[in-house]
């Protein structure tokens, strides 16, 4: 495999960065296959930078369509693609940006029904239509059930995950299932209470905040593919850490050092021997619970007649 003239022109500015590694690293990027789960606020900037950098194959999974309210942060979509599937809109964006990138799309959310059609595990055979091998998985999803599912499948597939999330003015990012470090279940063995989980649609989000995190995901994915963390003398030593971003704090970024993989973890401990069958029998949605509307107790209720009476008295 080699690069053509257009690729040399296109990637020249990153190939001359001494820490990057030149032609061989660029070829590693061209050979790489990255899965992006979610083409929203995190996925869009990640896709843009991965495609720009020359990652050979991007697989994008998302079942949503583009809405006007997405456009302030989901930079791969445009006014012209409102109403289209996000994966279709994102594939057009990549084709415009870099025709050297091969894009696969899955027009559905990642669920237990299709996860093993996308991510190759154990002895499944890979075909044109999947399941596929990946060098890195980007978790750009927006709900705990998907995060646990992605984690378990990634552990089984022995694939590192760059996980990020963002809400309002804050975000966090970590590298999971990488070089003996923790997986998502090591960090969060129990999901948060369902009523405490707020989506961007409800809580709000500043575009550049989620953009920072998505771009950072692309950077970490490129570093993994470029083998920055590998070898007897790695260019950077991998330290398990949770990176926290806050737009309203100083400093804006803080790194919290994490322990390695947790002994007894239900996903990644070698003695757990988690299999595909185990994962298929887990109910991820029930595990993470349903958010209920706040319950009104009988003594807190008031009849229409009483309410009307009270109103007139006032
Ligand atoms: Zn674990």
Image: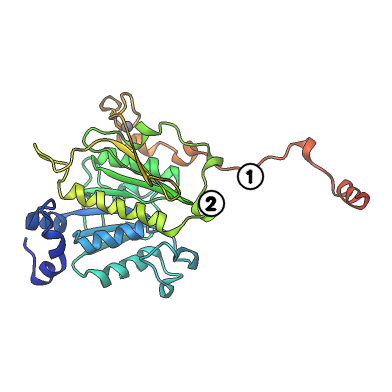
Q: Camera-side residue: 290 or 171?
A: 171
Assign ligand 1 to one image quadrant: top left
Dot 2 alpha-carbon crowd within 10 angstroms: few under 14, some 14 to 19, many 20 or more: few
Q: Camera-side residue: 141 or 280?
A: 141
Residue behind label 2 places its C-beta within 8 angstroms of ligand 1: no
Residue at 37% x, 65% y is 75
The reply to whether dot 1 and dot 2 touch (C-beta < 8 Å) is no
Q: Quadrant of the N terminus?
A: bottom left
User: What percent of the width, then of the height, locates residue 298?
Assistant: 77, 36
Residue at 18% x, 49% y is 225
User: What percent of the width, then of the height, locates residue 173?
Assistant: 35, 44
- In the displayed structure image, the side of residue 252 where residue 17 appears, left or right: left
What's the mark number on residue 293?
A: 1
Q: Camera-side residue: 225 or 283?
A: 225
Residue at 52% x, 47% y is 198
Q: Would residue 41 be seen by someone viewing this image from the given angle? A: no
Q: Is mark 1 on a helix, strand or loop?
A: loop
Q: Is mark 2 on a helix, strand or loop?
A: helix
* Label whose residue precedes the other's in the sequence (1 or 2): 2
In the depicted structure, whether residue 35 falls above or below residue 265: below
Separation of residues labelled 1 and 2 (CA atoms): 16 Å
- In the displayed structure image, the side of residue 134 where residue 183 appears, left or right: right
Instruction: Judge depth for marks 1 and 2 and give the one in front.
Output: 2
In the rendered image, the residue lying farthest to the bottom is 80
What's the mark number on residue 203?
A: 2
Badge count: 2
User: What percent of the width, then of the height, locates residue 60?
Assistant: 32, 58
Residue at 21% x, 36% y is 179
In the rendered image, the residue lying farthest to the front is 250
Q: Camera-side residue: 80 or 18?
A: 18
Dot 1 alpha-carbon crowd within 10 angstroms: few under 14, some 14 to 19, many 20 or more: few
Residue behind label 1 places its C-beta within 8 angstroms of ligand 1: no
């Amino acid at each position: 495999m080699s690069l053509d003239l257009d690729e040399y022109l296109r990637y020249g500015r990153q190939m001359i960065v001494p820490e990057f590694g030149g032609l061989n690293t660029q070829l590693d990027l061209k050979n790489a296959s990255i899965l992006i789960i979610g083409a929203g606020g995190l996925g869009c900037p990640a896709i843009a930078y991965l495609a720009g950098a020359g990652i050979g194959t991007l697989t994008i999974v998302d079942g949503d369509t583009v809405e006007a309210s997405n456009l302030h942060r989901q930079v791969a979509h445009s006014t012209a693609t409102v109403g289209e599937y996000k994966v279709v809109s994102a594939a057009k964006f990549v084709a415009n940006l870099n025709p050297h990138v091969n894009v696969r799309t899955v027009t559905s959310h990642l669920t237990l029904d299709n996860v093993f059609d996308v991510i190759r595990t154990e002895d499944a055979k890979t075909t044109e239509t999947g399941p596929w091998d990946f060098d890195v998985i980007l978790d750009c999803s927006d709900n705990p059930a998907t995060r646990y599912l992605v984690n378990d499948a990634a552990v089984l597939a022995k694939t590192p995950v760059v996980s990020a999330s963002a809400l309002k003015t804050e975000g966090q990012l970590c590298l999971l299932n990488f070089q003996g470090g923790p997986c998502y279940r090591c960090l969060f063995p129990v999901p948060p209470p369902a009523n405490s989980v707020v989506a961007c649609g409800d809580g709000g989000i500043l575009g550049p905040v989620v953009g920072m995190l998505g771009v950072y995901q692309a950077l970490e994915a490129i570093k993994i593919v470029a083998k920055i963390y590998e070898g007897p003398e790695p260019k950077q030593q991998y330290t398990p850490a949770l990176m926290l971003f806050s737009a309203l704090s100083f400093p804006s970024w803080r790194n919290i050092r994490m322990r390695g993989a947790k002994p007894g973890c239900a996903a990644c401990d070698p003695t757990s021997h988690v299999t595909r069958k185990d994962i298929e029998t887990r109910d991820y949605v029930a595990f993470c619970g349903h958010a209920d509307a706040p319950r009104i107790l009988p003594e807190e209720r008031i009849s229409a007649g009483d309410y009307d009476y009270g109103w007139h008295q006032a």
